Amino acid sequence: MEDMARKIDAHDVADWFINRIDRRMGEVITTDVVHRLLYFAQAWYLANTGHEMFEEEFEAWGTGPIIPAIYERFEHMDVASLPDIENSRTIKGSKLEMLECIQRDYGCYMPFKLDELAKEPGGPWHTARKGLAPLAPSDKIIPKAAMKSFYREKIKDAA
């Protein structure tokens, strides 16, 4: 019930990932990495719970799954490393557990590998871009239902 009572948005989740970087150890996070981690967090949360982690929609841009509001927020910042976010909201319960899993399972990958995984042939991003040139602009929405079913199949395949 705790997750239902408190809504979070994609900005809260982006802040969570950005604040997990250990800058003292030289770690950095880019806007592209934030978008991919957001995508995997939403996809796996949908697949595991049947509910969205946040309301915002992903668009199938040529560069990968993008939430326009997150892109606009960070577009003028240094893409090499986003700064810590002060006053970020606390995330709890199953959403926090999922974010910790995503950070553990995907946070170790280089940006090109995250892109490859997010753009998997037959996956939601790939399907939403059907008929478009590789880097053609697009505002096509990646359906949450497609994300949920695609990643649920991955759960079944792993069982």
Image (cartoon, grey):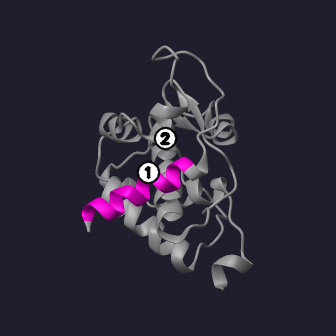
Q: Position of residue 30 (x, y in %)?
A: 46, 39
Q: Position of residue 67 (x, y in %)?
A: 63, 41
- Can residue 79 be seen here? The reply is no
Side of 14 where 44 appears, left or right: left
Side of 9 where 125 appears, left or right: left
Whether label 2 touches label 1, CB < 8 Å: yes
Q: Which residues are magenta?
A: 146-158
Q: Secondary structure at mark 1?
A: helix
For disc 1, the marked residue is: 150
Decide: is 126 above or below 100. Answer: above
Q: Secondary structure at mark 2?
A: helix
Q: Quadrant of the N terminus?
A: bottom right
Q: Residues within 10 Å of mark 1 (few under 14, many from 20)?
A: some
Q: In terms of image quadrants, where is residue 123?
A: top left
Q: Position of residue 91 (x, y in %)?
A: 59, 72
Residue that appears at 63% across and 36% down:
71
122 in the magenta segment: no
The number of discs equals: 2
- Can residue 138 be seen here? The reply is yes
Residue that appears at 51% across and 50% down:
147
Amino acid on which disc 1 is placed = Phe
For disc 2, the marked residue is: 124
Q: In terms of image quadrants, where is residue 102?
A: bottom left
Q: Seen from this angle, which residue lies furthest bottom?
A: 1
